[in-house]
Amino acid sequence: MARMVERELRGWFKDFFAAAGLLTRIPFIRRSRFDDEIPADGLIGRAARAFPFVGLAIGLVAGLAYALFAAIGLPDVIAAIIALAVGALVTGALHEDGLADTADGFGGGQSRDDKLSIMRDSRIGAYGVIALVLVLGAKLGALVDLDHIGLVLASLMAAGATSRALLPAMMRWVEPARVDGLSVAAGRPPASAVFMGLGLALLLSLILLNWTGLIALIIATIGACGMAFLARRQIGGQTGDVLGATQQVAELLFLLTVAAIR
């Protein structure tokens, strides 16, 4: 029995670090799995179940930054800006970059191939800038409106967990738009890992925010479904950029819902 528990815990730790290696840019995270030959089930596989825990950790770091600077007397808006900056720093602005590329592609391209080509371009265009300003500005407004250190911390943690738990679902049930790229390499996570991740996100949201967390999770899920529908219409499926944009939209909707209900 003890060996079984130990083996299961080892499996969870392994999955957590595999997921963190993809979703963050923390230097000490072991990234060799992503440098080796791609396994048959893709880079993610069962590690998809750990996505909400990685999101929870990212939200915790950002929330602690907010708490620290708010506690020493800085205005709430400055503390919120720092929290958003810390969150972007931990992830290497991976999701924000996906949001900008997706906005540029969907907004600036005429054909499917045009949109995909624009999304590959590392340069940011007008649509990308507008999307970043609107999304980050709305997040900032939501955090300032919460106006309570504990609520901001809980909201960032729950939003981080939920928004990242939704990504494996899109990877599982929305076909890739390309034949190569990060999304293809990541593969289709097993349904069991997807549902486990979603269940963990639900549990964490309820623990951190009670029924407000449940409502926020539902709204964030609707937003993710909307992104999946839009991606299919625009480019015929999902890409790594679309996944990043979906995370940003889901996180924003989660925070806005909490701010509206509180």
Image: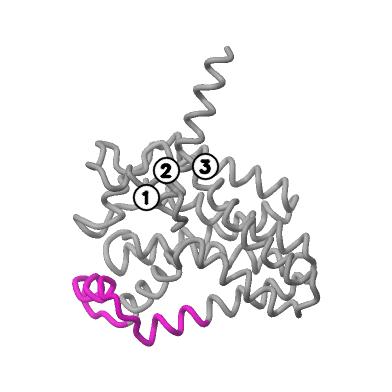
Element on which disc 3 rests = helix
Q: Nearer the viewer, residue 106 or 239?
A: 239
Residue placed most toward the observer, 135 or 92: 92
Q: Amino acid at mark 2?
A: Ala
Amino acid type of disc 1?
Met
Residue on which the image places disc 1: 171
- Of all residues, the one furthest to the front in this rendering is 28
Q: Earlier in the sequence, mark 2 or mark 3?
A: 2
Mark 3: few/some/many CA within 10 Å (<14, 14-19, 20+): many
Kind of residue indicated by mark 3: Gly
- Position of residue 45 measured from the top left corner of the image (x, y, whole percent): 36, 39
Question: From what the image shows, is residue 174 above or below residue 5?
Answer: below
Q: Is residue 107 above or below residue 190?
A: below
Mark 1 and mark 2: Cα distance apart in space:
16 Å
- Badge 1 element: helix
Give the residue at x 38% y 87%.
126
For residue 101, side relative to residue 50 (left or right): left
The residues tagged by marks 2 and 3 sit, at their Cα atoms, a distance apart of 14 Å
* Residue annotated with mark 3: 197
Label 1 crowd (10 A; few <14 / some 14-19 / many >=20): many
Q: Residue at x 25, y 71 (%)?
A: 120
Disc sitting over residue 18 in the figure: 2
What's the magenta region? 108-133
Residue 7: give x, y in percent of width and height: 50, 22
Question: Secondary structure of the magenta portion, mostly?
Answer: helix
Q: Is residue 239 magenta?
A: no
In the image, which is nearer the foreground, mark 2 or mark 3?
Answer: 2
